[in-house]
Image: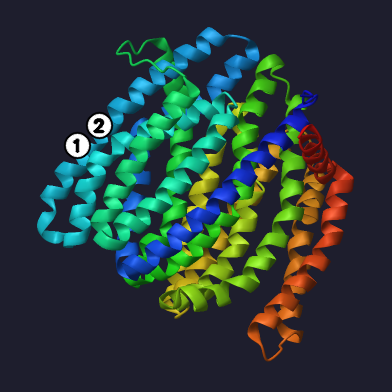
Amino acid sequence: MSKIKTVKEKIIKDTFIYTIVQYGSSIFGFIGATAMRSFLGPYLIGIWSLLRVIIEYTLWGELGVATATTFKIPFFKGKGDHGKAKQIEDVAFSFVFIMSVVSGLLILIGTFMLKDKLPAELFAGLVFISAYLCLERLYGYYLIILRAHSNFTVINKSVVFDSLVNLIFIFLLVKNFKMQGLYLTVTILACLNILFIHFLARHRVSFTLKLNGEMAHLLKYGLPLLFVGMLNMILRSTDRIMIAKMLGVTYVGYYSIALLSKNYVSGLSNNFGIVTIPKILEAYGKEENIEHIKKFVTISAEVISYILPCFLGMLYLLIPIFVQTFLPKFIPGILAAQVLLLEIFFSSFCPQASQFITALGKQSRMIPINIGAIIINILANYFFIKIGWGIAGVAVGTFMATLFSSFLILGYAMKHFTGHKEIIKFAIRCILPLIYIIVVVFGCTYFIRPVNVYAGLAIQVAVLIICCVPLLIYINKRTRILSTIFNILFKRVKRK
């Protein structure tokens, strides 16, 4: 077996395989998510969406320690201090577990205090997540450790396991027992995932009550990340909260179609970000030289901006027919899902810029940017709902907020190694592929209108694919990313 000779090839290989596994498994996940919406309906799906928001907010109780671990473990590995990295693992694990117990108790107490004011379904859900948090946090921390050590072999296997088991239990339990079946499904799945990863990775994490100086170090590094994470969660959940408050929980269910599309499409950039975090920190940890990591900011953004629009254009064409055919109850969410594709693009090409800023220890500089984005999101959502645009208007407001934050974060990161003119030129170069695909997609929908809907869709998709070829040729010429992927595939096939 030949070794991967460069960091670039290693990143591309890990990202490619990880993405194939994620999207391959997402087929099962998509079937499960579609079936779950069919079994539960818009109202109960809306309840579950709100419960997921609450679970996300409980991450605040970790005070940024788990997030700091994601960065500090590979940083000290890059320095060659493996003992320090292991010490951080154990201290952070102990703190995260203790805080998950505390968060669960607080949710339980608050739920019973507000019992008379809560719908029965929401009350039962809050009681459930108060107990479920510990399992969810333990599974999440295992994944953090595996990613920090770039152990994507175990992660890939666990992803496949998770998707298959989840699909089975959705049809066995959710179909027959509705929300109670869903609560039982996620509980069993978390337990099985923890056991699967533990026995496969054989990675020991020790619980300790000796939260020594390392804890103070993690808190100092993690608290700014906590605030950034808090603001990101507020930004991500503002749309659902405002829809629930101003339009009703059922409309949150309709909007879940847009979120479903976002979760699957943004996986490409998310996967890339997961792979690059340890690589950036290890590279920076060796000599703490910006020149060694600036390429992560520009190359990754450019690759995403030329490849992702092709997928977004295809999804824009497919969403209406898919929803009308398989999820007719969610037809009111089609337009919002299509609009949110713009938000997906702009949120996808700056994760490495955020990682770059964090590697430099300047994560607090992202706080005012995120605050500005939240204000824009709230005001825009309120305005568009009031003028009657509904959940599609909320999608527009979310896009506007993401556009603001993404460009400022990317610009601030690039300011450390280039000038303002170059930053503007780079941003324009990243936007051009999106504009090109928008023109192609609207051209397809306007000029190609055969009597048979499915034949028309097939022709539209074929034209879009042909029009995407120049983008792929250009980005491969600049980065050799597609050539590297084909080389990896050829080597694997040749070995077999």
Q: Position of residue 367 (x, y in %)?
A: 51, 41
- Amino acid on which disc 1 is placed: Leu
Name the residue at the bottom extreme: 451
**Apparent side of residue 139 relative to residue 345 in the rendered image (left or right):** left
Compare residues 280 and 90 and report the one nearer the observer: 90
Secondary structure at badge 1 equals helix
Asked where in the image residue 457 lies, by quadrant, the reply is bottom right
Label 2, residues with CA under 10 Å away: few <14, some 14-19, many ≥20: some
Quarter occupied by residue 226:
top left
Check if mark 1's residue and mark 2's residue have beta carbons within 8 Å.
Answer: yes
Quadrant in which residue 401 is drawn: bottom right
Camera-side residue of 489 and 81: 489
For label 1, the residue is 105
Q: Check disc 2 and report its element: helix, strand or loop.
A: helix
Amino acid at the residue labelled 2: Val
Image location (x, y in percent) of residue 2: 79, 24
* Label 2 sits on residue: 101
Depth order, front residue of 215/87: 87
Residue drawn at 41 percent across, 46 percent down: 165
- Visible in this render: residue 415? no
Q: Quadrant of the N terminus?
A: top right
